[in-house]
Amino acid sequence: MSFFYLFAVLAVLFVVPFIYFRISTKTQSKKKTPILYGVVAYLLTTLSKMILMATFLPDSDQEEADFTAQFEPVSALITIVVSSLDVLGCFLALRACSGHTEVKIFGVSFAWSATETILSFFLVSWIGCLKPEFNWIYMQNALGSNINLLRQIAFTHIIWVLWKGKFQNPDKGNIFIWLSAFFITPELFKLSEVLLGKYFIFGWVLLVIKFAVAYQLYITSKKYFQSFEQLKNNKKKN
Amino acid sequence: MKYFPRRSQTILCFFVLTFVFNSITVKSLETLPVFRLLHSEQVSSSTGKTFIRGTTSASVPSSQTKAYFECAEYLKKTPKTLTNLDQDTDIENETEEEIPHNEQEEFVKCFKGAVAVFPLFSLLEFDISALSEGGSCKGILIVLPRDLLTTKAKEFVTFQNEEGRESKEEIIKKLGEIESILVEKEFRVPIYFVHEDEVSHLFSFDNLNPNKKGSYNLKIVGKPGNKKKIKQVSSLEAWLPTDLDEEGKLKPTIVLTANYDTFSVSPALSSGLESGNNAVGVLVELSRLFTKLYNNPQTKGQYNLLFVLNGGSKQNYLGTKKWISSVDRKVLESVELVLCLDSLSIYDDDLENELTDDLFLHYSTGGKIEIGKTVPTEFQSISKLFGINTQIVTKKIMKNNPLISFEHEIFYRKKLKAITVSNFKSYNQTIRKGSLLDLQSGSNPTARPMKTVTTLIAEFLSKMIYKQQQQQQQITIFENNFEPNNLVIESINKMLLKYNRFSPFLEKDDQLLLNLENTFKSFGLDTKIESKKISLKKETFYYTGTQGKLTIFQVKSLLFEFFVFIMSLVYLAVLYYFLNGKEKTIQEIKQLIHNRKKNN
């Protein structure tokens, strides 16, 4: 067991979102309410998704970590449809909290991502890093959660633009396409894991691909957000 | 930045605590079975407590493996271990004189705190008894090659010392001596055995190269040994009767015996063939052939045949002694000859001196019974027909000597005519006593076909049984339909290989005995398993927990872990710098330094 490795993984898991949130909302106050609403929204959304998945998702004999597993299209489709509940959850969290736009967006994103990290990766990493077994997967998961944070921020921006634009944004067609990308990309990553796994390519290469995709989503959503803000400011001036 | 620790003492405490609670990280490879040395649990410390526990966990860090290699190189130049011993030299005295005390200490220091891993052949270069003291190392792991006798292996071919290449026979002899040391000497460290083929793809001896990075952590988990109460020894009888004589009495009986048990330096490894005896298959096949003959009234012999499989052969033929003391008196009185089958198949092209393809017929003299020359001579003449040379070995029975060399001596002491057929000339031949060279899988391709020996013994017996018909003619019965079937012998041998056959650990209802009983029954013989209670001397005891699980972990060094930690901190710093911007970050750092100076 190694506490060094554990501390390294925990630092990457939790310090990075904190740094990002702190820097993004440095000059703002009233940061607690978006975080609170974000956590509640995530928990309720995840619970609802779990109930729907348990109801509609067919049984699978495969284990998650089996890289020889086959990709199941039906399960993937159901997962994509159920994952669209994230839109509702994020929307409700943004609507409920008050404060500056940046604080709300980054607060909800940070809370959503941090809660997901704590529930999905914290315990696994704690136990795994202290096992008598060194495995890079825990560091990869930690870096993956950082990428998820980036993705979540991009997602929250898109939801904000759609909500505040009241579907009148001329680019709404493209925005919906980009929004659907948020749901499709996780399943595409699973498919690529299966395909690349047959050639023993996983881990770091997939992480780089995930980062590239998340960064592209972030850039695009940031672009939409900025164009929306500009449009809003122009309307105010007029 | 106010959430980050300000005090350097806090950071220092953090690192100290991390170092204190830290250990090397590991990556597991696989879990595989290991076998514990027979006597490794018998050692007690001066306080009377058991010294060795059920689990052993020790590391072989790269610094130790380097030291180990240095020791190896050092000792290769001045081999002062068993390789230079003469046949008659006492082993213990030789090691004390040959290896200076300080050099031995240096050697032992190499393994301190580590597991000493020895491929079997390296034991020829190292005096393993130097590691017998507690604290010298955490444990010893001996890697055994399988079926060593059958391999034209590099181990035999490439082993060298200063005097040149040693012969295969000498190496085998020395391995036997090493095994004797392992069994007889008191070791205060646990010794485990593992088969090379199970380990080689994970953890070969070549991987312990000091030039390669990384080291290994070996963890062995097993139940702690408990003293085993040895209650009984079992014998299996199969009776093939002929008709009673005119007075209604039993006709003469020929007894064929063999031993189903074996011995190994680790009880869990006692499944091999070759070193003790491997005549069980031959005996079973003989029973099948004679049952076939006796089933036909026209070919029914004039002798009863009693096939006996005894255990306890390695406890001075305890099983045979118990059996003979309990057998029916009428049967005992009708016994005309006892034919004891010992090892019958060791034969190797390379072994010219110690072992030959001759058979040896042993019988005793000096008692009230004389076997005469007829039986041995007849056996010799028949064996010549099969191209086998049989040598006759006689030994005067020493009534005061409790040690039994061959099984026939037990019957001879009970005033029965008995002979032993064996591939060994002498009872104390090293290869006979050693078990490390036993076959663990499959058959010996270089060995004499067992079919030939079976036919030879069957023809010899038939000459006795049908002597009235065959006085003038040399008739061979066991051919064509009555030819011994090698498959039967091989299948029996394969079955034997599946079971640990160390006698003290066998129970009356052991599956091995039940399977053998069923085999005899399937031929149509009357069978019986008899278990006799035994009482051993107080100083003789055995321990359970002879098997464990070995997990080998490939270890990453502490430095590597620390490096990962530092890299994660660098990643955080770079990310902060990237997100915050260059100017703001520098400004914050300056602010931090300025605040500290103010506080100080």
Image: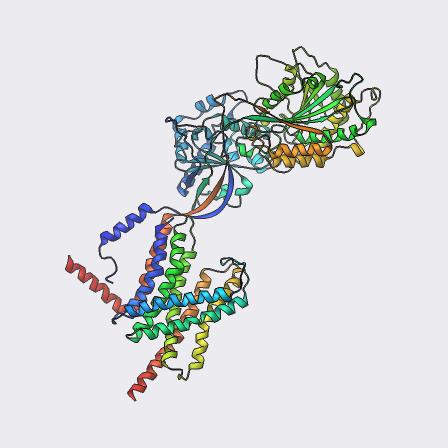
Colour theme: rainbow
The N terminus of chain B - image quarter: bottom left
Q: Quadrant of residue A155?
A: bottom left
Q: Quadrant of residue B365?
A: top right
Q: Position of residue B22 (x, y in %)?
A: 34, 47
Q: Quadrant of residue A42?
A: bottom left
Q: Residue at x 29, y 48 (%)?
A: B17
Q: Position of residue B403 (x, y in %)?
A: 57, 18
Q: How many marks?
A: 0
Horizontal side of B582 relative to B470 (left or right) equals left
Task: Residue B225: tell me if it is visible.
Answer: yes
Q: Position of residue B569 (x, y in %)?
A: 32, 58
Which residue lies most toward the bottom here? A238
Task: Residue A154: tell me if it is visible.
Answer: no
Q: Position of residue B593 (x, y in %)?
A: 20, 61
Horizontal side of A41 relative to B533 (left or right) equals left
In the figure, B2 relative to B460: above or below? below
| B7 or A177, nearer to the observer | A177
Horizontal side of A147 relative to B532 (left or right) equals left
In the figure, B381 relative to A119: above or below? above
The C terminus of chain B - image quarter: bottom left
In the figure, A91 relative to B308: above or below? below
Q: Residue at x 30, y 89 (%)?
A: A238
